Amino acid sequence: PRPIGGTGPVPLSGSELMTVFRCDEPCKVSCKDHGDCTRRCHDHAKCEILIPKALACGHTRRGPCQADTSKIKCTEKSKQSHPACGHTVEVSCGQNVADQKCRVALITQRQGCEHRLVGECHVFADLALNVKNMKIRTAADPELSLTALPVPECSEVVKVQRSGGCLHSVFVECRNINEAVGNQKHPAINFFPKPIGQLATLPLRPCEDFVEIKLFCGHSQYGRCALATKLRGMKRGNRVGTQFQSMDVIPHDFWPPPAQIVQALPLPTCTECARDRRLQLEKTAQQRQEEMRQQQKMVLLAATGVDAETLEAWAGGSRSAVQPRMAIHGEVRSEEH
């Protein structure tokens, strides 16, 4: 090395030496199969042309001409039957099929809720399940959801009934049943493809479904389920006591207008009954007016002695037609006297 402040030569790095002292002479490596190397002089001593190489396993793979075949890894794959489950799996050459994980998608039922669970065969085998009797997933079945342990909680959507009152239905995920409505049994048929609608928010709020409240008078009023449920505990003799015709949810398309919805207790006066009473009063008033009219008619008939036709004409305002008849009747009565 050059001393500090000196003027001696400076050493070069390896890359710099290759740049400065690169040999441009033809390569002298020669192969008995491919002849002389066509590249410039370089640091190799074997033929590097890629050719098909026959491997010990019987497969063929492209590799350098002078490469040792025992050092070339075979990448060929074959389909073999897995000894643990009998499913057909794809195995790389040289690997033991028993050491491979069977990734065939299978369908089984969860323990407890009995909903369908789709997972890879090796996961179910790790759970000590009988994978040989399981159904292989098809395109019509749910998507693959389990590829490794642990098994996640069931997220299928189920329809369950509220507890403690209205018994209306709500949609929740299977894993949330106990939190929502307690320990309820639900069969596997309670499966709904997503999306099913709005899932219930936990913890459950008071039921907001609309129900029809059947009154003793036979008419109906409408209110939220939580309000209607309060009426159940009221005595039958109570003024606002009610009986329920149905606790079924009213479909959204048939929701009553806001003016007809009961918002709080006590129940308002039945509008149907009020209308019926009003119509009855009007009908009664008309009947009384007709009766009074008939009574007045009879009094006039008795007092004047005119016939009913003349009296009707008089009541109708046709005085000119009535006067002669009244005169005639008067003369007749005078003669009689």
Image (cartoon, helix red, strand yellow):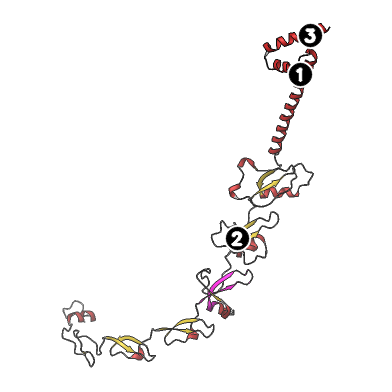
Label 3 sits on what residue type?
A: Val
Label 3 SS: helix
Q: Name the residue that disc number 2 marks.
A: 172
Q: Is residue 108 magenta?
A: yes
In three-dimensional space, the C-alpha distance between marks 3 and 2, rounded to whole angstroms, equals 97 Å
The answer to whether residue 2 shows anywhere in this view is no
Q: Is residue 224 magenta?
A: no
Residue at image location 30% in from the left, 89% down from the top: 67
The answer to whether residue 118 shows anywhere in this view is yes
Label 2 SS: strand
Q: Position of residue 36 (x, y in %)?
A: 19, 89
Q: Quadrant of the N terminus?
A: bottom left
In three-dimensional space, the C-alpha distance between marks 2 and 1, rounded to whole angstroms, equals 77 Å
**Relative to residue 36, is residue 129 depicted above or below?**
above
Which numbered marker is on residue 207?
none
Describe residue 260's horizontal placement relative to residue 46 as left or right: right
Q: Earlier in the sequence, mark 3 or mark 2?
A: 2
Q: Name the residue that disc number 3 marks.
A: 332
Label 2 sits on what residue type?
A: Val
Q: Name the residue that disc number 1 marks.
A: 297
Label 1 sits on what residue type?
A: Lys
Q: Earlier in the sequence, mark 2 or mark 1?
A: 2
Dot 3, how many residues are within 10 Å of its Cα: few (below 14), some (14-19), or many (20+)? Answer: few
Q: Nearer the viewer, mark 3 or mark 2?
A: 3
Q: Position of residue 121 (x, y in %)?
A: 53, 78
Region in magenta: 104-123
Disc 2 vs disc 1: Cβ atoms closer than 8 Å? no
Disc 3 vs disc 2: Cβ atoms closer than 8 Å? no
Q: Nearer the viewer, residue 132 or 268?
A: 132
Most extreme residue toward the bottom, as rendered? 32
